[in-house]
Amino acid sequence: MNRPKYHFYPNPHDEYAWTKCPKCYTKTRVRKFCMMIHYGEKPLKFHRMVSLRMDCKFCTECELIIKRKSEIESFLQQLVESWGMKFKPENCFVFGTMDMKDWKQSQQTPFEPSEALKKIAPFKDVLDFKIQPAGWYFTGDKE
């Protein structure tokens, strides 16, 4: 495996698009990434590594990738159901990225699992941010 490359935030909030980075508040940009996802049923019956090319929000300063969790799950649900299986969101785990040139090559001739793992850059960290909706909040003591 390559060395860790990016931070990742699987955004659980469909109503927040993160036009600014939640870490440094600089403007995010849209960039395509090949997201590597592990899908495995529990108990250990079925495991598969999936690569999905997706548009993600990206902060160049923090190297933070932001992707809505619901979008990842909807792509994966269609794929898992095409395999004739029932989709369970708790069985999927996004663990890294692959370079686009490697991803394109894998579309032509699929890699062996051991070879694919060498081309994957795991995430440095998977982050979680607390959101406080805009509005007035009482900050002083009651009198």
Image (spheres, grey):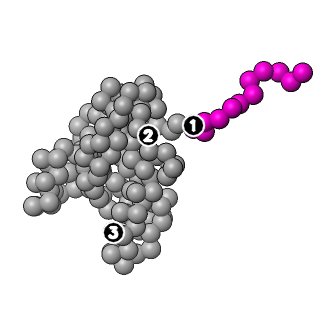
Q: Residue at x 51, y 38 (%)?
A: 128
Q: Residue at x 26, y 46 (%)?
A: 33
Left-right relation of 24 to 108:
right
> How many other residues sit within 10 Å of disc 3, few (<14), some (14-19) or many (≥20)?
some
Q: As displayed, is residue 84 above or below residue 127?
A: below
Amino acid on which disc 2 is placed: Trp
Of the 4 image quadrants, the one containing the N terminus is: top left
Q: Which residues are magenta?
A: 130-143
**Residues under labels 1 and 2: Cα distance?**
13 Å
Where's residue 71, x and y in %?
Answer: 40, 57
Q: As displayed, is residue 52 above or below residue 57?
A: below
The residue beneath circle 2 is: 18
Please name whichever residue, 61 or 40, is drawn nearer the observer in this view of the structure.
61
Tag 1's secondary structure? Answer: loop
User: Which circle's residue, 3 or 2, is located before the other in the chain?
Assistant: 2
- Say the numbered circle drawn on residue 130: 1
- The extreme right residue here reads 143
- The extreme front residue here reads 136
Q: Nearer the viewer, mark 1 or mark 3?
A: 1
User: Which circle's residue, 1 or 3, is located before the other in the chain?
Assistant: 3
- Say the numbered circle drawn on residue 79: 3
